[in-house]
């Protein structure tokens, strides 16, 4: 079976509980992490270090990993006169924005890792794809972090810009090709319910050819929603 979760946001205990349940119920599982495994809670680096060792766990790029990929190459350098002179306002602003959006917990966690582990995490993030196309249960899926902004039926996926996969917010406007499902996170489903004039609930939302799966794991009171792509069944942790 193939499963998808999104926006774990450093909740190591949730991640471990997820793997334990999948291993117990479906030893041959494949799991897609649809980005934002890091930040907010202090466990994102542990999640990435674990996931990179598992061939059946596939991590896609989220906007929080993107922020890390922008900031870490120069943050992890040895401090020299040359590296200090390269710190301009653009780099300072990038770090400030990352910290404001929850990156402080990841930076704190990185301080406890050795040089090899830090380098492995950066390489792993750099190698992440921004989308995956999956066939499961007789259905076709496009998995991304935030959906697919500026959708055009005639446009190839390779022709979309990086922000189209990482930063979209409008659930009502997310579209994809007929006969295929767009599966994404990024916007907590409690916020999507509010956008739709409904009571906020942390559950997976099924729309026409689209499925939103960020159940606010990174927020107080939220939970991790896991979607089985073969059956479209959902369980929560």
Image (tube, rainbow, N blue to C red):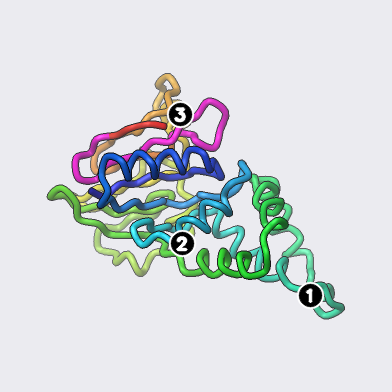
At 35% from the left and 69% from the top, the residue drawn is: 158
> Of 73 and 175, which appears nearest the observer?
73
Q: Earlier in the sequence, mark 1 or mark 3?
A: 1
The answer to whether residue 148 shows anywhere in this view is no
The secondary structure making up most of the magenta span is: loop
Number of residues whose C-alpha sits closer than 10 Å to that of mark 2, classed few (under 14), some (14–19) or many (20 or more) = some
Q: Earlier in the sequence, mark 2 or mark 1?
A: 2
> Of 91 and 232, which appears nearest the observer?
232
Q: Give the quarter of the image for residue 220.
A: top right
The answer to whether residue 166 shows anywhere in this view is yes
Q: Give the quarter of the image for residue 68.
A: bottom right
Asked which secondary structure carries label 2, the reply is loop
What numbered label is drawn on residue 52? 2
Location of residue 116 in the rendering, given as x and y in whole percent from the top left corner: 62, 70
Location of residue 130 in the rendering, given as x and y in whole percent from the top left corner: 42, 61
Number of residues whose C-alpha sits closer than 10 Å to that of mark 3, classed few (under 14), some (14–19) or many (20 or more) = many
Name the outermost residue toward the right: 81
The residue wearing badge 3 is: 190
> Please, is residue 97 above or below residue 161 in the view?
above
Asked which secondary structure carries label 3, the reply is helix
> Of 212 and 226, which appears nearest the observer?
226
Asked which secondary structure carries label 1, the reply is loop
The residue wearing badge 1 is: 86
């Amino acid at each position: 079976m193939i499963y998808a979760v999104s926006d774990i946001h450093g909740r190591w205990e949730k991640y471990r509980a997820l793997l334990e349940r999948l291993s117990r119920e479906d030893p041959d599982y494949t799991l897609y992490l649809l980005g934002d495994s890091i930040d907010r809670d202090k466990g994102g680096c542990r999640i990435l270090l674990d996931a990179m060792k598992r061939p059946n766990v596939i991590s896609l790029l989220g906007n929080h990993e993107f922020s890390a990929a922008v900031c870490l190459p120069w943050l992890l350098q040895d401090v020299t006169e040359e590296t200090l002179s390269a710190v301009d306002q653009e780099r300072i602003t990038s770090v400030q924005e990352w910290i404001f959006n929850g990156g402080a917990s990841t930076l704190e966690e990185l301080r406890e890792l050795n040089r090899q582990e830090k380098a492995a995490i950066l390489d792993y993030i750099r190698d992440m794809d921004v989308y995956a196309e999956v066939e499961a249960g007789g259905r076709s899926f496009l998995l991304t972090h935030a959906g697919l902004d500026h959708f055009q039926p005639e446009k190839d996926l390779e022709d979309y810009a990086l922000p189209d996969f990482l930063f979209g917010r409008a659930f009502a406007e997310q579209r994809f090709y007929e006969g295929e499902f767009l599966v994404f996170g990024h916007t907590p489903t409690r916020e999507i319910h509010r956008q739709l004039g409904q009571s906020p609930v942390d559950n997976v939302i099924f729309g026409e050819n689209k499925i939103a799966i960020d159940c606010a794991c990174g927020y107080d009171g939220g939970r991790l929603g896991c979607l089985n792509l073969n059956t479209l069944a959902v369980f929560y942790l």
